[in-house]
Amino acid sequence: MSIKSALESEGIDFSEYMNPPEQWNGQALIRNINGTKYACCPFCQKKALLISPNTKIQHLKLKCKGSNCKKEFEVNV
Ligand SMILES: [Zn+2]
């Protein structure tokens, strides 16, 4: 018996398990640290860029500097 038919025999709609619960859109995490905003890596939360009140950034691709992370994300402020 396949996993799919096993789940269906339990009355579980298999399609619910095929989609991730939250679709992440590739955006940086904006954190406010002691009143200063930073664009942070959404994977390891490492600070990547300081965001001043008049900073305007669109579609900036950044690569995380974390040695165990190195993932790419996009900054829009
Ligand atoms: Zn990271």
Image (spheres, rainbow, N blue to C red):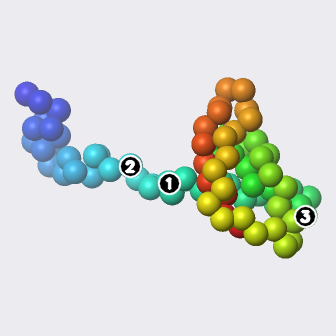
Q: Which residue is mark 3?
A: 35
Residue lying at 55% horizontally and 53% vertically, measured from the top left: 26
Q: Residue furthest bottom?
A: 54
Query: Relative to residue 5, is residue 51 drawn left or right?
Result: right
Residue 10 image point, x, y percent: 15, 43
The residue at 60%/42% (across/down) is 72
Viewer-proximal residue, 2 or 10?
A: 2
Q: Which residue is mark 1?
A: 24
Label 2 packing within 10 angstroms: few (<14), some (14-19), many (20+): few
- Which quadrant would residue 60 be assigned to in this image? bottom right
Q: From the viewer's perspective, is 76 left or right of 47? A: left
Q: Badge 2 is on which residue?
A: 20
Q: Amino acid at mark 3?
A: Gly
Secondary structure under tag 1 reads: loop
- Give residue 22's position: percent from left, percent from top: 45, 55
Disc 1, disc 2: CB below 8 Å? yes
Looking at this view, is 29 or 2 the one in front?
29
Foreground pick, 4 / 49? 49
Name the image quarter holding the C terminus: bottom right
Q: Earlier in the sequence, mark 1 or mark 3?
A: 1
Left or right side of 24 for 71 = right
Q: Is mark 2 within 8 Å of ligand 1?
A: no
